[in-house]
Image: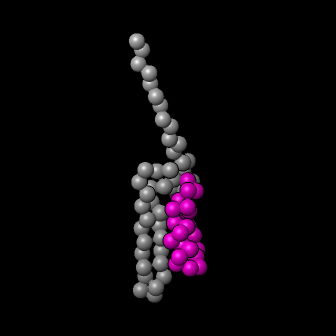
């Protein structure tokens, strides 16, 4: 998952809320917004951005031993 996760939240005059998840490639973006969506009520629609279709970056720890 990306190091930095962002959500852009817009509240329209009619009370409708728009949530856009940024900096999270792949389907994990849905996990980022899930709690907020649940607390707001019924989801009217979802639109996937180009980031949704990007591969999630796998992180690996590499240890290098110095030779003696």
Residue drawn at x 56%, y 62% as measured from the top left: 30
Q: Position of residue 31 (x, y in %)?
A: 55, 61
The image quadrant of residue 45 is bottom right
Residue 13 in percent (x, y) is at 41, 86
Q: In this orientation, which residue lies closer to the viewer: 10 or 64?
A: 64
Residue 35 falls within the magenta-colored stretch: yes
**Residue pictured at 51% horizontal, 66% vertical:** 33
Q: Is residue 60 magenta?
A: no
Counting from the top left corner in percent of width and height, residue 28 is at 55, 56
The quadrant of the image that shows the C terminus is top left
Rendered residue at 47%/31% (across/down)? 62
Report which quarter residue 27 is drawn in: bottom right
Tell me where residue 41 appears, x and y as whole percent. Answer: 56, 79
Question: Quick one: which residue is furthest to the front in this view?
Answer: 68
State how many labels appear.
0
For the point 59% across and 79% down, the residue is: 42
Give the residue at the far top of this rendering: 68
Horizontal relation, residue 45 to residue 65: left or right: right
Vertical position of residue 68 compared to residue 64: above or below:
above
Bounds of the magenta segment: 26-50
**63 relative to 60, above or below:** above
The one of 62 and 17 positioned closer to us in this rendering: 62
In the displayed structure, 62 sits above or below 24; it is above
How is the protein colored in the picture? one colour
């Amino acid at each position: 998952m990306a190091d930095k996760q962002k959500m852009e939240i817009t509240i329209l005059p009619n009370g409708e809320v728009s949530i856009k998840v940024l900096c999270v490639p792949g389907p994990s973006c849905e996990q980022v917004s899930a709690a907020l969506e649940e607390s707001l009520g019924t989801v009217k629609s979802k639109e996937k951005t180009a980031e949704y279709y990007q591969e999630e970056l796998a992180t690996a720890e590499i240890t290098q031993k110095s030779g003696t």
